[in-house]
Image (cartoon, rainbow, N blue to C red):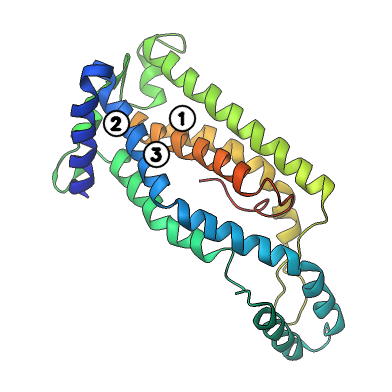
Amino acid sequence: MHVFADLVGSFADLLQPVFHTGAAAAAIILFTACVRLAIHPLSRAAARGQKARTKLAPQIAEVRKEHAKNPERMRKALMELHAEEKVSPLSGCLPSLLQMPAFFLMYHLFANRRIGGRPNELLGHSLFAAPLGDRWTDALAHGGLLGGAGLVYVALFVIVAGVATFNFRRMKRQMATAPMPVMPAGPDGQRVPGVGAMTRMMPLLSFATLFTVGVVPLAAALYVVTSTTWTAAERYFLYRDAPLAGALAPAV
């Protein structure tokens, strides 16, 4: 972990002549973008897999309808269908799962005051008047909402709200113009209870990032805002020709 902290510190040293006291914040944004760029091939693989599964959705629905009373035959028929079309049932989600360690690593790096048994020097820097180790409550306690630190959080909230609104409107359009995807079935072939309700709530989850930014240290908030904005832009381009694909993927 401390290796990554040292790397971000090196970025900050390189950026210091340009960003001065905000060099560490700029380094966090740059490092987050570099990590997302490195795992972009996984996102592309996830998009290809999801598009392939979306194309199979009508055939999958037909198989489930035909073998609704015979779960074992249904599973066999679905496996044969995926094998025939050369599509893995996990092709859409496995790459996304492989990205999670990187996300947790980056969050841990920017959210903890000690890394490898020593103080996290990244949190000792500031973005304008807001220390990277402080939270929104600290900003409110020292200057209020419109104080120097408070205005930094206002700017972050505006960015997150804009990205969340973009994601919300896009998901609502996807759900309105395309049929719902085939929901996962239980062992008896019946739909899993609650999945439909969760799907309807999915567009609102983008706004949960507002809560995250409000409770984590500013360094972690910068990571979250950068990663969330990257995700929105990435999905727009990866799924722009597939109105349904990616609609149910959580924003990270």
In the image, what residue occupies the spot 60% across and 36% down?
A: 207
Q: Where on the picture, by quarter, is residue 136?
A: top left
Q: Identify residue type, mark 2.
A: Ala
Q: Where on the picture, by quarter, is residue 152?
A: top left
User: Which x, y percent locates residue 184?
Assistant: 70, 69
In the image, what residue occupies the spot 86% across and 83% down?
A: 66
**Residue that badge 2 annotates:** 27
In the image, what residue occupies the spot 27% across and 41% down?
A: 112
User: Which x, y percent locates residue 251?
Assistant: 56, 45
Q: How many angstroms separate mark 3 from mark 1 (CA)?
A: 21 Å
Q: How many angstroms separate mark 2 from mark 3 (CA)?
A: 10 Å
Marking on residue 214: 1
Q: Where on the picture, by quarter, is residue 120?
A: top left
**Residue that badge 3 annotates:** 33
Asked if 59 appears above or below 227 in the picture, the reply is below
Say which label, 2 or 3, has the lower sequence index. Answer: 2
Query: Between residues 171 and 120, which one lies in front from this camera angle?
Result: 171
Say which label, 2 or 1, has the lower sequence index. Answer: 2
Q: Identify residue type, mark 1.
A: Gly
Which one is closest to the eye, mark 3 or mark 1? Answer: 3
Query: Between residues 143 and 1, which one lies in front from this camera angle?
Result: 1
Q: How many angstroms separate mark 2 from mark 1 (CA)?
A: 21 Å
Q: Is residue 36 left or right of residue 132?
A: right
- In the rendered image, the residue lying farthest to the left is 118
